[in-house]
Amino acid sequence: MTRGLFVTRPAVLFVCLGNICRSPLAQAAFRREAERRGLDVEIDSAGTGAWHVGRPPDRRAQAVARRHGIDISGYRGRQVSAEDFRHFTHIVALDRENLADLKRLRPADGTAQLLLLLDTVEGRQGQAVADPYLGADSDFDITWSDAVAGAKGLADRIEGEASG
Ligand code: 4NP
């Protein structure tokens, strides 16, 4: 894919370590942002690690999403695969370690654009969405607000790419 008009529908995969805290919240926030804008896009999330494959999101992630009117209880953890690099147009890392892992995992024929979520947010370039897993409930509020900011920045970027 070159810059300019999308020849395929955009497809975005959010990736964190466990796929139970940050990337499900990014998925939920971006789903809502895309719906608000009428942006037709496939959205999913995955983890670089396999510990939580098949599991629902962390109860604290479910709770913060629910407080913002979104039910993520049906999400299930999965691990990023080689096929993801061919299927998705954008694979979006939540932190720099996730991004480094993705660069290492990318197959030679991978076509997805790899990026850091907060690189799309003015003034937040290079920043990580901090891992809240070992934190307090309030850390999930920070995760949510970062996910919302990233969702807007990413939607702006994808709309910009689509219009050339
Ligand atoms: P996430 O958080 O990467 O935002 O889903 C984590 C969840 C689980 C673990 C680490 C981070 N873990 O080590 O099990």
Image (cartoon, helix red, strand yellow):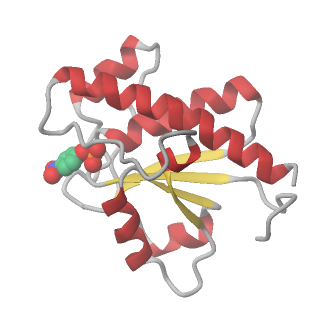
Nearer to me, 152 or 74: 152
Residue 111 location (% of width, % of height): 63, 74
Eyeballing the image, is 131 above or below 73? below
Eyeballing the image, is 108 above or below 73? below
Left/right placement of residue 58 relative to residue 48 reads left
Eyeballing the image, is 25 above or below 66? below
Left/right placement of residue 68 relative to residue 31 reads left
Residue 46 location (% of width, % of height): 39, 54
The quarter of the picture where residue 56 lies is: top left
Q: Is residue 37 visible?
A: yes
Q: Residue at x 29, y 28 (%)?
A: 61
Quarter of the image where the N terminus is located: bottom right
Left/right placement of residue 75 relative to residue 10 reads left
Residue 121 location (% of width, % of height): 55, 40
Nearer to me, 101 or 96: 96
Q: Is residue 79 visible?
A: no
